Image (cartoon, grey):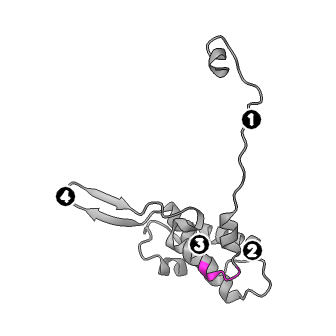
Amino acid sequence: MSNRVAATQVRSIMIDIDASYSDSDIDVFITTANKIIEDVITHSSVTEATLTQVELWLSAHLVAVTDPRLMEESIGDAKDKYQSKIGFGLDLSHYGQVAKMVDWTGSLALKDQSKIPARMEILNPVLDDDNAEDLFQ
């Protein structure tokens, strides 16, 4: 499906977006948000208006996580302070939090909570005289 929102709409909710982002840069995030929405929000009674709002806020979230928000700036002794982690996944930005709220199906929130289990195996350890004793102690 084609994107529901335009770069200008994303800019309109992101007051402090870096001016160096071109519309085509933002379009990449919009396309990604659109793909996520198409894959995750499958409830048949979700309106296009709701999907458009989710896409808008999710697009802004994707931009925001690559361009953290400046929270504090000083001139004397040149001090900057950027918004740091306020959560994980969609909770990492205020825009992602709004995207979850707008999605009344809860699909984004559920997907955001899913965890992929990690597993590590040593398939073929390399042993030599220098490290063999360390591995088995």
Q: Which residues are magenta?
A: 101-105
Mark 2 and mark 4: Cα distance apart in space: 48 Å
- The amino acid type, in three-letter code, at marker 2 is Glu
Q: Observer-nearest residue: 4 or 129?
A: 129
Q: Earlier in the sequence, mark 2 or mark 1?
A: 2
Q: Is residue 34 visible?
A: no
Looking at the rendered image, the disc whose residue lies closer to the viewer, 2 or 1, is 1
Element class at badge 3? helix
Q: Measuring 72% from the left and 24% from the top, which residue is drawn there? A: 125
Q: Which residue is tagged 4? A: 76
Q: Earlier in the sequence, mark 1 or mark 3?
A: 3
The extreme left residue here reads 76
Looking at the rendered image, the disc whose residue lies closer to the viewer, 1 or 3, is 1
Q: Earlier in the sequence, mark 2 or mark 4?
A: 2
Q: Which residue is tagged 1? A: 121
In this rendering, position of residue 60 left or right of residue 78: right
On-image quarter of the C terminus: top right
**x, y percent for residue 76:** 19, 58
Element class at badge 2? helix
Mark 1 and mark 4: Cα distance apart in space: 52 Å
Report how many numbered discs are placed on residues in the image.
4
Q: Which residue is tagged 3? A: 59
The mark found on residue 38 in the picture is 2
Q: Measuring 67% from the left and 77% from the top, which residue is drawn there? A: 3
Mark 3 and mark 4: Cα distance apart in space: 35 Å
Q: Observer-nearest residue: 76 or 111?
A: 111
- The amino acid type, in three-letter code, at marker 3 is Ser
Mark 1 and mark 3: Cα distance apart in space: 37 Å
**x, y percent for residue 66:** 51, 61
